[in-house]
Amino acid sequence: MKWNILHESRGRIRLHLRKPRMSLAEADQLQDYLTNLPGVRTAAVYERTCDVVIVYTESRAGIVRGLAAFRFDTEALAEVPANSPRAVNREYQEKLVNMTIFHLARKLFLPAPLRMVYTLVRSVPYIFRGLRCVFRRKLEVEVLDALSIGVSMLRGDFGTAGSVMFLLRLGELLEEWTRKKSLGDLARCMSLNVDRVWQQTAEGEVLVPISQVCAGDAIVVHTGSVIPLDGKVLDGEASVNQASLTGEAEPVRKSEGAVVYAGTVVEEGQITVTVEQQAGNGRYDQIVKMIENSEKLKSASETRAAALADKLVPYSLLGTAVTYALTRNATRAISILMVDFSCALKLSMPLAVLSAMRECGSYHITVKGGKYLEALANADTIVFDKTGTLTHATPTVVQVVPFGTRTEDEVLQIAACLEEHYPHSMANAVVQAAAAKGIRHDEMHSEVQYVVAHGIASQIGGEKAVIGSQHFVFEDEGCYIPTNECGKFDALPPEYSHLYLAIGGVLAGVICIADPLREEASEVLKQLRGLGIRKAVMMTGDNDRTASVIAKQVGVDRYYAEVLPEDKANFVEQEKAAGHTVIMLGDGINDSPALSAAAVGIAISDGDALAREIADVTIAAHSLSEPVHFATNIRSTDILAIRQALLNGMGIAVDMPLVQICEDLLAGTLIPILPGWVRPPIECYIVTNSSAWRMKRVRTFMQWYAHAMQELFASFEEKVSSIVGLPRDEFVRERDKVLYS
């Protein structure tokens, strides 16, 4: 691709793509490509002008090479989601501009009688909603809206009634825009994000992009994997967890002819599925779209704010009546109706929560509902899994200890043959160790049976072979250590995790696996204690020796070793019964019951698919620090912002005649944010109090709003001037002549 450099400074470059136009899908593809370039901190793509702004931290030459290598990929364009944030922004920007232009054009060009008729027609829905609330014997915000509009029209002030309706529509549009953007981000985070699948062909299983799979194709889904597409079972049998669809954690048996759905997880077994719906058309995608209609995930603060908003309506009506009784001034009485405290409560809280959920994305965090943010802020107990959570999910085999007559290579070969069927980090470590030594592990066993949180069982040479935890091998399966080798067993290094292999009821070998502790683990725990966590617990299925070493390094209050999945869930339930708010942090199938039982279940993004589906929050695998930084912001900045929004009474006044507000301007209770630029009929002011004006947050908002309004009115003048066939400057001069003559 060819680029022109428009502007350049240290660490920042603005370029123009030599292309006549750019579609939204192309802009999304380019944005994704630039964001993933090494050294790029931020990248912004402007599809209207084909411009790109890149902020980078590494060498300029690398950025230039990356830009030169970029090509629009037709296949990748087809995978760009239809509900991209860019498309949403384009849609609502056009709605906002069109609404504003129409409002201004109506005030400028429409004769007074027609404006009156238009206002009357537009007021019908608002009046109807207000009357409906009254008939239901409820005093809600809609009653205030109807009264303010109705009384204004009864007094003959159709301009005020029209402005009130315009502001109400503007507020509804902005709320819908923010909500749609937030929910769109959330939906994309909750999507399956399955890039490739195993397709069954005549030559065997082939790994292909999911976009190439069509209806009628056969795909293979292994144990622990998510089913990526809707379809019917062609072959095999499996236990499928459908909690993501039905909410039921009990797995369902699926065999030939059974229907399976995208987003569900194979807990045990293996199935071949005939695809019925291509990617994007399955039942899971439909459920993601239904997130918008979900009410059960609202936080308690949102519910309380909505209830409080409705309770304030009678007081607003009382204030109106008292004001009129004392002053006999209808204008002052109506002003009480115009100052709608209820809307500030009703709108600010949900938008604050949604904004916080959207902000999670910048910290690589997916939150499935507002109530989980609130639970995180109130949590006092946290339970950690060990492997893949406190430790890196990239364990490596450091030692193979054979027992009996087996050799190290034999033990590793058999272990790899069994473990290749199990999608777990420790299983991958065994397979990779065998591959590194050049050991072939062709199928030498019968059907593999996977026992959740325990291990794997199969038949080799007519003998039962098991591999897994100490509890599974020695207690559940009753295996024993060969005679005269108890000393070798006791001498196993305690700092490593151990994987036990037994054949014919006799221990054949132990594989020692190093799973290094995350560097940030102990520091993260200290930070969590500063945020109100009073109790930290580690629970693992690993042996006590290894668990004690890790627990001491991290600094948890208590640890439990060799626990089962139900033990983790029981512990969480006990803590909840004792009045604690519990966070569970894990990454595997064995953590799923505890993740479901906790007030907030947090899963690692590259962990098991079932754990991610059940969890309430998903965090990035590369670091545990980012969730802590985010939690800090949630507890301080965001909550403070909500309080300030509610207590300081900041609002926006539009369409106010200058004569009515000159005293307030002189007193400083109204602050013009577009002085010397915007002229009647549109005047914009910030309504605030003196204490709020001294806050940096309020001043920052004013600056942002002024910039946004300048862009909005500039766009308006450009459109209107093009309609009347005049240059923009000439149009502004002619407009001012008419307005000020």
Image (cartoon, rainbow, N blue to C red):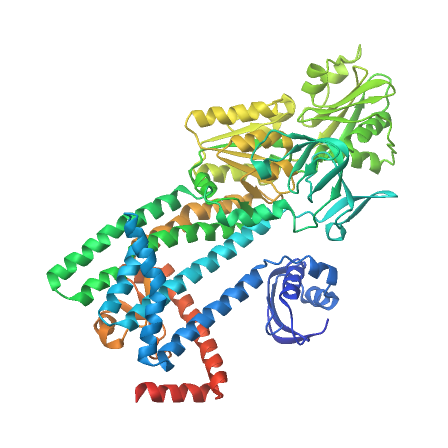
- Indicate whether 5 appears above or below 169: below
Pick whichever, 582 or 196, lies toward us.
196
Q: Which residue is drawn at 27% across and 50% down?
A: 312
Q: Can the viewer see residue 555 in this picture?
A: no
Pick whichever, 673 or 220, lies toward us.
220
x, y percent for residue 188? 59, 51
Looking at the rendered image, the quarter that the N terminus falls into is bottom right
Residue 146 figure quarter = bottom left
| Left or right of residue 726: residue 679 | left
| Left or right of residue 43: residue 197 | right
Looking at the rendered image, the quarter that the C terminus falls into is bottom left
Q: Can the viewer see residue 625 in this picture?
A: yes
x, y percent for residue 738? 34, 88
- Indicate whether 143 appears above or below 27: above
Tally of numbered tags:
0
Q: Residue at x 75, y 14 (%)?
A: 479
x, y percent for residue 663? 21, 72
x, y percent for residue 722? 50, 84
Pick whichever, 317 or 435, lies toward us.
317
| Left or right of residue 265: residue 174 | left
- Indicate whether 287 appears above or below 141: above
Q: Which residue is drawn at 46% across and 53% down?
A: 355
Residue 534 figure quarter = top left
